[in-house]
Image: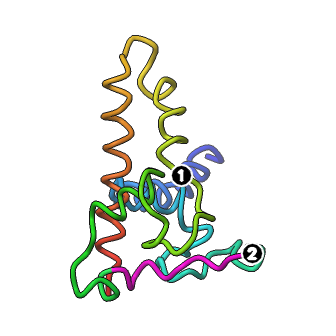
Amino acid sequence: MLRLACLLSLAPTVLAAQDMTIGQAEFMNSCAQCHGADGKGNGTITPFLTVPPPDLSQIQKGNGGVFPVAAVYGIIDGSGAAGVHGTTEMPAWGRRYAHQAPEALGWYYGSADAEEYVRGRILALVEHIALLQE
């Protein structure tokens, strides 16, 4: 009976996780600590940062009403200019994802598959940030 009660108590958590998109889950895992769940720069570790993170919900507004997909991708990847993000304080997640690719994909996948894996994770994240725009 105790086991059933424990399993039932986990059900809302499992259901909530299933309702998240890949990009939202990626954002909550990699970005929300600094940028906040809503992307407004109010994350839990913000008080400890030397440079406050920018409000990601205003990227489109600051770019003439157009969401700059390639620029945001480049900032996350680490290959883009820091101008859109404001500083180079943000970690380059592309490198982190590339290091995780062999573990996530298995040893039998080649470097092309690892690049696709990284690209997919970053694109999912970019899509979620685009949905945060006000």
Is 53 covered by the magenta stretch?
A: yes
Q: Amino acid at mark 1?
A: Ala
User: Looking at the rendered structure, which numbered label has been put on residue 80?
Assistant: none
Q: Position of residue 50 (x, y in %)?
A: 75, 75
Q: Is residue 106 above or below residue 28?
A: above
Q: Is residue 102 above or below residue 78?
A: above
Identify the residue under disc 2. 50
Q: Position of residue 67 (x, y in %)?
A: 26, 75
Identify the residue under disc 1. 92
Q: Is residue 76 above or below residue 41?
A: above
**Relative side of 26 to 5, left or right:** left
Q: Secondary structure at mark 2?
A: loop
- Residues 101 and 112: in front is 112
Q: Magenta region's main secondary structure?
A: loop
Q: Secondary structure at mark 1?
A: loop
Looking at the image, what colour scheme do you see?
rainbow
Q: Quadrant of the C terminus?
A: bottom left
**Residue at the location (62% across, 43% down)?**
3
Q: Is residue 13 above or below residue 42?
A: above
Q: Residue furthest top?
A: 108
Q: In the image, which residues are magenta?
A: 51-59
Circle 2 Cα neighbour tier, 10 Å, few/some/many (<14 / 14–19 / ≥20):
few
